[in-house]
Amino acid sequence: MAFVKVLKNKAYFKRFQVKPRRRREGKTDYRARRKMVRQDKNKFNNKKYRMVVRFTNRKCICQIMYATIRGDMVVAQATSAELAKFGIPAGYKNYAAAYCTGLLVARRVLKKFGLDEAFKGKEEIDGADYHVEDEENDKRPFKCILDVGLQTTAAGHRMWGALKGAVDGGLHIPHTNKKFPGFKASDEKGGESEYDAEAHKEKIFGGQVKDYMEMLAEEDPTKYEAHFSKYIAGDLDGEKLEEMYSDAHEKIREDPEHELAEKKGITHAKGEAGQMTASDGTEHVRNKKI
């Protein structure tokens, strides 16, 4: 019988270093995070802001935050679920909703720091390139960098809608239009690329949703009624989508403030086995993070 070399022996396991918890869970790319969070030593304790964009199965979440030793501190946040109060009844994770959410968090954070009057952003939405830092102003614009997490930065992705919304809202986020819808790279090496602002504008106002609604209404009315029931309940069809989003953009600029939900007055009591019992009768066990 041949001898088998033991590769993972006692010495290996004594030197083994456990990865951070969020790396083990597959939630954080620490190489990317270090690059975004790293601050020059001569800037001491200056805050380095990031615009964090995440998508769940139901909504888009945008947050402005900065990193500390204790953890990330959120300055302002907005979710696409809030768009209901701005006249958008459904479709909270498409490109148009991501744009509205980015615009909302931008106007919200600028108002918090008293910069909303100095930096109005781009009020006429046409999909064209816009950089607030190019405008002449006595004050410097609020600067942050885009944090997309583990999401692949594919061309035309919804994350660019959130970025475009925040930029049009008046934030200074370093970027190019290479990943935006409507961008076409040159076929020849060294040639000029093309950017179709109209194609981007169509995505911002839900043009792809309009096309799908009209196609489905014509080919399969039953499926159309099931898929777009909330739009139908709000008396909306494909032709009214652009007007709906235009009104939402105006309402966001008028009043971006977040309204706190009413407290329900529920109290919690902890049992001997670790279960939590609420005053409304619900009961659950809290999981410990190892």
Image: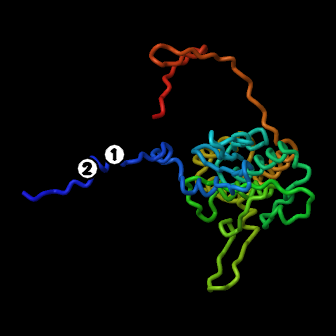
The location of residue 129, given as percent across then percent down, is: 78, 67
Image height of 134 relative to 149, above or below: below
* Quadrant of the snapshot with the N terminus: bottom left
- Please name whichever residue, 90 or 239, is drawn nearer the observer in this view of the structure: 90
The location of residue 233, given as percent across then percent down, is: 71, 39
Hey, what amino acid is under mark 1? Lys
The location of residue 14, given as percent across then percent down, is: 33, 45
Residue 162 lies in quadrant = bottom right
Residue at coordinates 48% horizontally, 48% vertically from top-left?
A: 23
Decide: few, some or many residues near mark 2? Use Cα within 10 Å; few <14, some 14-19, many ≥20: few
The residues tagged by marks 2 and 1 sit, at their Cα atoms, a distance apart of 9 Å
| Number of numbered labels in the structure image | 2
- Please name whichever residue, 160 or 144, is drawn nearer the observer in this view of the structure: 144
Marks 2 and 1, the one that precedes in the sequence: 2
Judge from the rendering whether residue 231 lies leftward or rightward of residue 130; answer left or right.
left
Residue 215 lies in quadrant = bottom right
Residue at coordinates 57% horizontally, 45% vertically from top-left?
A: 57
The location of residue 238, given as percent across then percent down, is: 72, 53
Q: What kind of element bears circle 1?
A: helix
- Please name whichever residue, 227 or 25, is drawn nearer the observer in this view of the structure: 25
- Please name whichever residue, 267 or 82, is drawn nearer the observer in this view of the structure: 267
The structure's colour scheme is: rainbow
Residue 189 lies in quadrant = bottom right
Residue 237 appears in the picture as rendered? no
Judge from the rendering whether residue 284 lies leftward or rightward of residue 18; answer left or right.
right
Judge from the rendering whether residue 139 lies leftward or rightward of residue 233; answer left or right.
right
Residue at coordinates 88% horizontally, 54% vertically from top-left?
A: 120
Name the residue beneath numbered marker 2. 9
Hey, what amino acid is under mark 2? Asn
Name the residue beneath numbered marker 1. 14
